[in-house]
Image: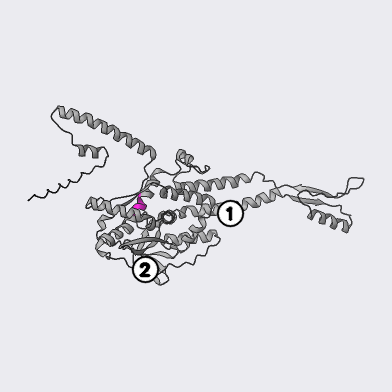
Amino acid sequence: MTPTPDDIPRRPRTLSARALQDLTPGEWSVGGVRAALRQHVEGDFARSALLVDSVRGDDRIGADLRTRVMAVTGLPFRVDPSPDGDQRRALAVARELAAAWPRICPASTARALMRWAVMLQVAVGTCAWQSDGGRWTPQIKVWHPQHARFDSFGEAMQVQTTEGLADVTPGDGTWLLYQPEGDRSWMEAAVRGLAIPYLMRTLGRRDWNRWTEKHGLPILGASVPEKADKDDKDGFFADLRKLGSEGLVLLPKDENGRGFDVDMIEPANVQAWKGFEAALYHCDVSAAVALLGQASNAQEGGSYAKAQTLNLIRQDLLEADALGLAEFLREQVVKPWARFNFGDAALAPVPVWDATPPEDAKRNAETRKTAGEAFRLWQDAAAAAGFEVDFEAYARASGVPVRRLPKPTPPAAPPETP
């Protein structure tokens, strides 16, 4: 349960317990994957978190995951003032947070949060607070979810630490819990759909290599005369075993053409490689759809220009990821920071990863420019008819944020001369 602002202490508390780290990566069988996914559905991430580590090692899935994550963390970032309270004070607080943000949530930390949020739909961490210059500054520590599980009786996420089992209370200034889809968010985890394609890619590549080996190194069939001397037969077989890439073997025959011979025995399924290729392509498409929302990059690679052309990531996914990450950090990190340092969580600034497409930004700028030119015309027409145009209402209707300037302080009266 998320605490209310009154439940948050005025000063942060230090968490002495550390996360357990006993990662045991290994090979996965079909049965092992199914067991991990069963536990995951029940809210136990002991195996599924390790499965995510293995799945990330796949070149195709890993590349699509990096594209999804870096598309968000690579967006233009800014810190907006809180929309509540005294705006002059909110602006000063936002500037202070912007200066401290690289220490609070560096890019690597944001990427770690996004990776777990996408693959597991659960990211767990803590805030490590430091006091410097009269300010409390948090630093986000992302924990491996291997030891996290949902307690269905207590209806709370729990983490096994070096000091025992601990309840995760998001928003208390100490614990962090990011569930992009809310309650039972883990049911939307990408690993549930990627586990089988991961196995298919792993096993399919192994079998394809075995097939290639058999066809690239065909079987040699040795023919020997039935009445040949045993020493001649043994010597012939020994010579065949020593053949290299450019081997030469002596094949003696009698006057009737009978004697030793060698045949290449080619497997008949010479087109079987197409089945492997089709299976791997199916897995590529599955990974692209699961992580990027579409399959446009299943066979396309890399440059930024190509990404812009193909629109590799669905815009709605990008916007949802950027908004979800910002809301999570504001609620569970920035609001406690504002309360601890300024005594008011309402002053918490708003972190923003701007996912507005460049084309839309250009179109919005042109629209506002046109609206500004039209305002002058309306203003002249209204003045001629004895009216005036409400500038503030017009600006807000055109999507232009405006703020009334504070009244200037009148100059002090000069001292009276005696």
Q: Are marks 2 and 1 in contact (CB under 8 Å)?
A: no
Q: Is residue 328 visible?
A: no
Amino acid carrying label 2: it is Leu
Q: Residue furthest bottom?
A: 163
Which residue is painted at 66% across and 49% down in the image?
Answer: 212
Which residue is painted at 38% across and 61% down in the image?
Answer: 139
Left or right: residue 253 versus residue 182 is right
The magenta span reads: 323-328
Q: Is residue 327 magenta?
A: yes
Amino acid carrying label 1: it is Leu
Q: Residue furthest left?
A: 418
Frontmost residue, 403 versus 350: 403
Label 2 sits on residue: 15
Q: Is residue 387 above or below residue 215?
A: above
Label 1 sits on residue: 203
Q: Residues within 10 Å of mark 2 (few under 14, many from 20)?
A: few
Residue 124, quarter of the rendered image: bottom left
Give the CA distance from mark 2 to mark 1. Answer: 44 Å
Residue 281 in the image, given as x and y percentages of width and height: 55, 45
Residue 12 in the image, given as x and y percentages of width and height: 31, 65
Left or right: residue 336 versus residue 234 is left
Residue 331 in the image, given as x and y percentages of width and height: 31, 57
